[in-house]
Image (cartoon, rainbow, N blue to C red):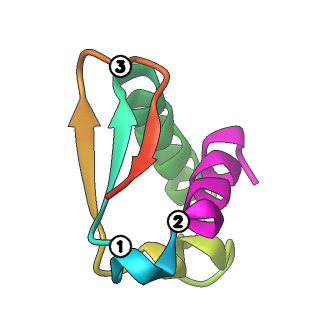
């Protein structure tokens, strides 16, 4: 699994469920770009984000938002 997917997983695990269901993952510019590259790489190799890697299924229904100012941020909203 890529580093950014691990960071997103960690952020989701750390999210306080008492605040309700997470609705979005906000990624800094670098993280957002890396996620796009990772997705392109998985599809180029015949991989499928929803089946072969497993983890991104947890992101279904969550928006991925770009944060242009906090370049290294991963935040669950």
Residue 2: where, in percent of width, then height?
A: 71, 45
Q: Neighbour class for label 1 at 10 Å: few (<14), some, many (≥20)?
A: some
Sequence-wise, which precedes: disc 1 or disc 3? 1
The secondary structure type at the circle numbered 3 is loop
**Residue furthest out toward the right:** 1
Q: Neighbour class for label 3 at 10 Å: few (<14), some, many (≥20)?
A: some
Structural distance between the alpha carbons of marks 3 and 2: 19 Å
> Which region is colored magenta?
1-15
Q: Residue at x 51, y 58 (%)?
A: 43
Q: Is residue 44 above or below residue 71?
A: below
Rendered image quadrant of residue 20: bottom left
Q: Neighbour class for label 2 at 10 Å: few (<14), some, many (≥20)?
A: some
Residue 29: where, in percent of width, then height?
A: 34, 23
Residue 42 included in the magenta stretch of the image: no
Q: For residue 13, which numbered disc appears in the image?
A: none
Sequence-wise, which precedes: disc 3 or disc 2? 2
Q: Residue at x 64, y 46 (%)?
A: 7
Label 1, on which residue? Answer: 22
Q: Is residue 63 above or below residue 7?
A: below
Where, quadrant-wise, is the C terminus in this rendering? bottom left
Sequence-wise, which precedes: disc 1 or disc 2? 2
Q: Residue at x 44, y 21 (%)?
A: 30
Do the residues bearing badges 1 and 2 touch, measured as CB atoms within 8 Å?
A: yes
Label 3, on which residue? Answer: 70
The secondary structure type at the circle numbered 1 is loop
**5 sits to left or right of 60:** right
């Amino acid at each position: 699994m890529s580093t950014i997917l691990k960071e997103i997983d960690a952020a989701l695990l750390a999210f306080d469920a008492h605040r309700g269901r997470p609705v979005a993952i906000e990624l800094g510019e670098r993280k957002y770009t890396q996620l796009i590259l990772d997705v392109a790489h998985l599809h180029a190799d015949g991989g499928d984000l929803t089946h072969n890697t497993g983890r991104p299924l947890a992101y279904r229904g969550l928006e991925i938002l770009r944060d242009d100012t906090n370049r290294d941020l991963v935040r669950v909203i």
